[in-house]
Amino acid sequence: MDFDLTEEQKDIKKAAREFCEKELTPELAIEFDKKEEFPIELYRKAAKLGFTSMRFPEEYDGQGYGILEDCLVTEEMCRVDPGLGVAIMSGTFALPDLVLTHGTEEQKEKYIPPLSRGEKVSAGAFTEPEHGSDLSLMDTTAIKKGDGWVINGDKQFITNAPVADSFCVLCQTSPDAKPTYRGESLFTVDKGTDGLDVTKLKDKMGIRSAITGAVSLSDVAVTKDNLLGELNKGFYYVLEFFDGSRIAVAAQAVGMAQGAFERAFRYAKERKQFGSPIIQFQGISFKLADMATKIQTARLLTHKAAWMFDQGKVDPMLTAMAKAYASRVAMEVTDEAIQVYGGYGYLADYHVERFHRCAKITEIYEGTTEMQKLTIMRYLLKRM
Amino acid sequence: MEIIVCIKHVPETAEADITIDESGKRIEVEDLVFDINEWDDYALEEAVQLKEKLGGSVTAMTVGSEEGDSTLRKCLARGADRAIRLTDKAFEGSDGYATAKILHRAIKELPYDLILTGAQAGDDGYAQVGVTLAELLGVPHATMVKKVEFSGDQARVNRELEGGLEAVIEMKLPALITIQTGINEPRYVSIMGIRKAKSKEIKVLGLKELGLKEDEVGKAGSWMTVERMFVPPVEKEVEILEGTSDEVTTKITDILRAKGLI
Amino acid sequence: MTELFVLAEHRQGEIRDVTFELLTKGKELAKKTSTDLTAIVLGHNAGNHAKRLADHAKRVLVIEDPRLENFNSEAYQMVLSQLISQRKPSLTLMGHTAFGVDLAPSLATELNLPLATDCVDLDFEGETLTVIRQVYGGKVNVKARVRKSEGYIVTIRPATFETEEGTPLGGKIVTIESPLSEDIEYKRFIEYVQPPAGEVDITAADSLIGIGRGIKDADNMPMMEELAATLGGVLVCSRPIVDKEWLPADRQVGTSGKTVKPKLYIAVGISGAFQHLTGMKNSDLIIAINKDPKAPIFRVADYGVVEDLFKIVPSLKSKISEAREAHT
Ligand SMILES: Cc1cc2nc3c(=O)[nH]c(=O)nc-3n(C[C@H](O)[C@H](O)[C@H](O)COP(=O)(O)OP(=O)(O)OC[C@H]3O[C@@H](n4cnc5c(N)ncnc54)[C@H](O)[C@@H]3O)c2cc1C
Ligand SMILES: Cc1cc2nc3c(=O)[nH]c(=O)nc-3n(C[C@H](O)[C@H](O)[C@H](O)COP(=O)(O)OP(=O)(O)OC[C@H]3O[C@@H](n4cnc5c(N)ncnc54)[C@H](O)[C@@H]3O)c2cc1C
């Protein structure tokens, strides 16, 4: 048994850290948090250095690593800034992963290399206004017409939607299928296709530079080349995709917690009250000890889930545990970080409040914490 | 062009809390973060840029312990083609002179047109290794260089003198140049670079392989022996302004007003 | 009698200050060790230099050669190695400058004489030469012993010793024939390049705000410019700020930049490496803001603030601006 990262993994972490510390400056973080825009320049810069294509194969201009290495980069990004970090690392969200596992060679050639190089941005459109945690029935339909399909419906909360070049959309193709999820299929839809319309969602609580939009599809005509994988397998593909992507969310949470913790730790050493640095008060120091312990635990769980995934031994229970636990830790640690800062922690200029606002998303997207617990229980009941 | 860059793995101390250890001859390095010496960072970048422009290869070389591998791997990831670490128990405690002797033995066996080092190291600040090495190799040198150009077998360099003045020097290759900060913009380590570095090995050479004797290196082969370290004395007794940020800035403003500066 | 050499440094017709600093220290050491203080000057038409040096040394050795007019380490090394081999001085001092750094290590190696570089003090303790050097960017001093030898070469940090004028020593000027026989082809001095003149003359300003790597990011430049503007001062900086191109080179303070002596110098996020201190430590009033209480800048400051600069600067700006308004 070996809990150490390899030298190569350490180098990856260090490279990401150097990039983030120089580029994801606190000023940019506040600026983008305020203006709610996708940091396209930073995304391109990060992509040029390979940070956003860690898990894509080399033949598609990716880096050929696994989810674990992807997580190491994600952690460093979110440690320096949770908003910019999530935004940059989500630029290649969902579509390339699904294309890689189920797409045709043409689809891979078309989509993945430009995403690897940071020339394009992708999105995954699953959630609908009426269907979030429960994706087993989609109101968005794709009806066969001639050789292709016509898509109609609305998608809600779609990361990158306002800037995405291509979407991967979950649609109901066989409304009469029993159970209904056996009638769902995935399609790629490119920006500029007639009938595709995006509106930006504003005033989010956190990760405000990872922009989100509502997508409306009205009579969007696609060809058979847009079908991803087999007809009526979409639901399964998406669940399987989440088994990997949820680990990345856990890594976001670990990074956010780490960043807030380090800030709080430094502050506690510097801030003096009653004649001594507040870190000398047990009430504060025990807090910091607990924060560090929780982060360490969350990281171990996340790395294990990632490692299992990379070994081809995906364990949905472990993934769910990692996501549920790490996201809770992120909430608790960022909350305590504000507490350590006292009143200053409540001000934007001291950054930890942003970490707290951002951390919340990790308990919601890609399956809420409650959904993770359902998964954990389902496996426990099976296994125990 | 065959280029050798000498690299040192040093602790980052500008913002760190430094304490002198029990021996009184060293600082505690346990909690310090080590990285490539600031000046060497620019030297490496210059070497890689020259290679990209003129072809050839870059070899990064360091004298030091195995810990230095992380810095050598960084060099490989940033474009060096090979790395050599010169390590031996006997090398410990080497000063700038002994270090140059070790480098000399390794380099004289290699083909090279150009050797780059940093103008100095941020830790012991000898600013000596490069020029000593040049003398041992019998090649011309130029220190604190801010610009390098080549024509034929000639290197034309701008040396930085005091007060921003520069001197242009021409040298015949092979030559050694010590690099001053600001000559270029060091690149980030890329993931592509890390992948490429995987297939490049770090060669390790010790006392025997280099044909050195124990008394030529380490403390025995050095000119300098550290007697003790201490915190430098103050030149002026500084008055530290205490209080909240608000109180402190009020005090500063009062001082400035009293001196008629506002 | 044994000699103690001080190597004079000159450039573009001027003897550099460090020479007189070394002669002052050299005089003290020569007295202590009962040796003769000899100034060495290599150059072309160096007569005037020799005359000035004669005030500060027992003897001045002049090596005249057009090939020595502008510094070329190879030519200097040839001359000096011969001179030192012949006269065997107990010690040769030169500045830890662009000149000394280019020359001393190769000269010492050729002669197999121990070299100590960048020293801020030196002394003979019995037969042993001991030196004090600053390491880790000036945060720690080292006292080191130099290996015993019949002669040593030491480079001294400029502006470490203060020049004492004292009574002229009326040293004897001796001209020695240059041993150089032909031009050195493999290393040639071509020309000097003057730094471009800046828009503002920072040496003429009364108030300077000096910023260093502590300001972290180019995005913080406007904040610092505003502080300088509010104070009616000029923004200057340490070297890394110029290396990153956040300010032009003519705003750099220090050995490779400008030496300033304003009425007020506020150092913000500058650690205080000697190359920077040399350029500003004689300012009338120095206020340093740095979050590291051990930063060397506090050793030359009159007032210090140990705090995160991002907490101090905005508040300071508004306080100064209030004070100015109240005044007018
Ligand atoms: C910023 C942001 C970005 C997003 N990005 C994307 C994206 O790129 N693509 C995409 O498809 N979606 C995206 N989403 C949508 C996200 O995945 C959903 O919000 C999430 O799955 C929850 O769905 P819902 O909002 O409809 O909540 P609901 O499903 O309505 O849940 C409401 C509450 O009920 C709980 N709940 C529901 N069912 C159960 C149950 N059986 N047992 C116990 N509790 C239950 C939930 O846990 C939650 O607490 C994003 C959301 C946000 C906020
Ligand atoms: C031949 C030669 C010539 C040189 N010439 C010059 C020269 O002319 N001028 C010059 O300046 N340098 C010169 N240098 C470089 C010099 O050695 C130092 O590297 C340089 O001065 C360091 O600059 P700095 O103090 O800005 O940075 P650092 O040494 O990195 O110091 C940064 C400081 O900022 C503080 N800090 C960080 N964050 C904060 C915060 N939030 N709040 C408060 N404080 C903070 C840190 O505690 C630290 O003390 C020269 C070097 C060589 C070799």
Image (cartoon, rainbow, N blue to C red):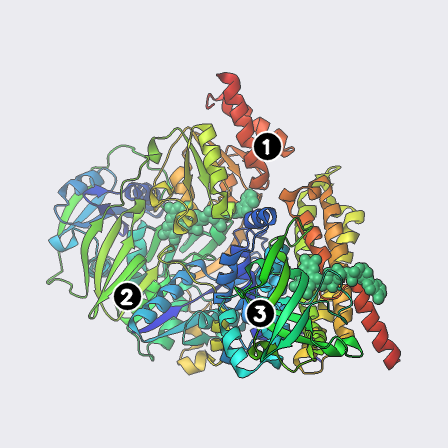
Chain bearing tag 3 is: A
* Foreground: disc 1 or disc 2: 1
For the residue pair C237 and A375, the one nearer the viewer reads as A375
**Is the residue marked by circle 3 packed among few (<14), some (14-19), or many (20+) residues within 10 Å?**
many
Identify the amino acid type marked 2: Glu
C-alpha gap between disc 1 and disc 2: 52 Å
The part of the image, by quadrant, that contains residue B133 is: bottom left
Chain bearing tag 1 is: B
Identify the amino acid type marked 3: Val
- Residue A46 in view in this figure: yes
Horizontally, residue A353 falls left or right of residue C233, namely right
For the residue pair C212 and A149, the one nearer the viewer reads as A149
Label 3 residue near ligand 1, CB within 8 Å: no
SS assignment at label 1? loop
Identify the amino acid type marked 1: Leu
C-alpha gap between disc 3 and disc 1: 63 Å
Rendered residue at 79%/53% (across/down): A286
Disc number for residue B54? none
Which residue is disc 1 drawn over? Answer: B241
